[in-house]
Structures are given as structure tokens and as C-alpha cells.
Image (cartoon, helix red, strand yellow):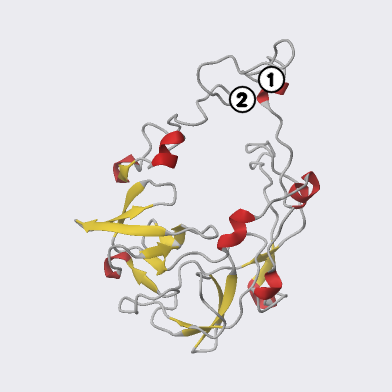
Amino acid sequence: MSGIEYSKLLTASEPHKALTSGVQRAQGRNNRGRITVRHKGGGHKRLYREIDFSYEKRGVPARVETIEYDPNRSGFIGILLYKDGERRYALLPQGIVAGSEIVAGEHAPVTPGNRLPLKSIPVGTFIYNVEVKSGQGGKLGRAAGSHIEVVARAEGYVDLKMPSSEIRRVLEDCWATVGEVSNPENKLVSIGKAGRSRWLGIRPTVRGSAMNPVDHPYGGGEGRSGRGLRRAKTKWGKPSGKGQKTRTPKKYSNYLIVSRRKVGKRKATQ
């Protein structure tokens, strides 16, 4: 079992009360109470931090007041104290420290933490918290240690290389934050025991080959049996596993995909 020494990285142990609220987690259920995502439930009670993913205060400089842990996401967050006295939470980039100055604006410097429209960001820059639709707030590249690379610009669109290796187009009027998401050591954490997963709200996953034939395509057989199928399947018979395309064939955003993500063994070699 391993963890992160937060005491060396964070500057505050308690959240800013005015920017928090209670939240009822869905825990894998839909509006009818049916399980739609398995292996979720339980976990420690969480206080929700209200994050400003859109940086609506354009042109107003802000100072990073704190660097804090957020149980609802893997990256670190921090309080931005704006020149007009307002405080807001934001997702912080790597390398930023308490006291750093950041600003959101069309002509802001291209430095970590600053937010600009994609048309103002040079090719080759690493960005995160990227909008899919202008004014909607950041949706892409928000996990700890992740970044998106600007690879091309043409015809009102910007081509972005995702952490998954997919290259997709986004309108150049959408905004993004320069840098890489903080807390890159998050991927090195070893959970270590089953109980710690339960604290995080992760329920057990049962192997399909350990089930009965009625419960899974891999179920049944005498003793320990392989799946007995050419291709990997989910519990419901849909394709899964390495090397298989699982994206909806007629998805509305297919025209924005320039290059599909590389999966399975090919991804490791390219």
C-alpha cells in the first residue's frame, strides 16, 4: 500500500466554507434507482468544492492563495483571490505555488495557469481543462497529471491530441488553461487492500469466468476455464477488451475525430 505525502505539497487542510456544499452521490444509480454503472457505492462522505471550470472573470488578475486536496477529483485545487476581492476554486497546473499570479484573457501570456482561447495558443503547447463548446466550461483533460497537446490549426478548428492518443477537432473559440494538471504522482499510488477501495466508493469486481453461464458469456465450465470465445465480451455480449472498437458507430461527434485512439498492444509500440 502506498500514498502521497500531502503535507509537503498542500498549504491548507480545511476547505473554504463559502465555496463548499453537500452533495448526494449517484453511486452508479439512475433516476429510478437502478444500477447503470456497476462497482460503485458506499465510500466516505464527501464535501463538494465548487470549482470554476470556465474562469468567467476575464481580464481580472488573480493570486493563488492556497493549494488544497479535493476528494472529488485526482488533481489539486486552489483558491484564486481576484483583484476585486472575490475568491473561487480552480483546478491547478503542475509547478504552480501559493502566491503565483494567473489571469484569463485573449492576450494573456502563454504560461502555466493562464487561460486563453485556443486560437491564441501556439501549436505544441500543453493545455488542460479544455472546452468542447464555447462558454460551457472545461470538459477535457482534467485528471491528475494529464495534458492535451495543440497539434494543428485550420479552418476555424484546432486539432488536439488527447491523453488517449486520439486527435480530435475543437472550435478555436473554445478556451483552455495552459499547463498540465497537478498531482502527477497520483498514478503511482497502490491501493494495497480491499478496504481502502471501499473507502473510495469502489465495490468489488467479480470475474466473468467465476460466474455461471446464465450470468456471463464467460461463465460455466469444469474447473478453471478460459473464456472460450475468440473475442472479449462484456456481461451483455458487447465487444470489449484490447484492440476492439467500442465507440458508437454513428455518434454525433464522429466528424470531429481526425485520428482514432490507439488501443491494446499497438498503443504501447507507437
Q: Amino acid at mark 2?
A: Lys
Q: Quadrant of residue 50?
A: bottom right
Q: Percent from the top left, x then y, of residue 98?
A: 57, 82
Q: Quadrant of residue 136?
A: bottom left
Q: Is residue 243 left or right of residue 7?
A: left
Element under disc 2: loop
Q: Are marks 1 and 2 in contact (CB under 8 Å)?
A: yes
Q: Amino acid at mark 1?
A: Asp
Q: Residue at left 51%, top 16%? A: 230
Q: Percent from the top left, x then y, of residue 187?
A: 59, 54
Q: Is residue 245 visible?
A: yes
Q: Which residue is mark 1?
A: 215
Q: Residue at left 58%, top 24%? A: 236
Q: Is residue 20 left or right of residue 245?
A: right
Q: Residue furthest right?
A: 195
Label 2 Cα crowd, 10 Å radius (few <14 / some 14-19 / many 20+): few
Q: Percent from the top left, x then y, of residue 170?
A: 32, 55
Element under disc 1: loop
Front residue of 48/217: it is 217
Q: Percent from the top left, x then y, of residue 176?
A: 39, 65
Q: Residue furthest left?
A: 155
Q: Which residue is mark 2?
A: 235
* 15 in relation to 259, above or below: below
Label 1 Cα crowd, 10 Å radius (few <14 / some 14-19 / many 20+): some
Front residue of 229/246: it is 229
- Earlier-in-chain disc, 1 versus 2: 1
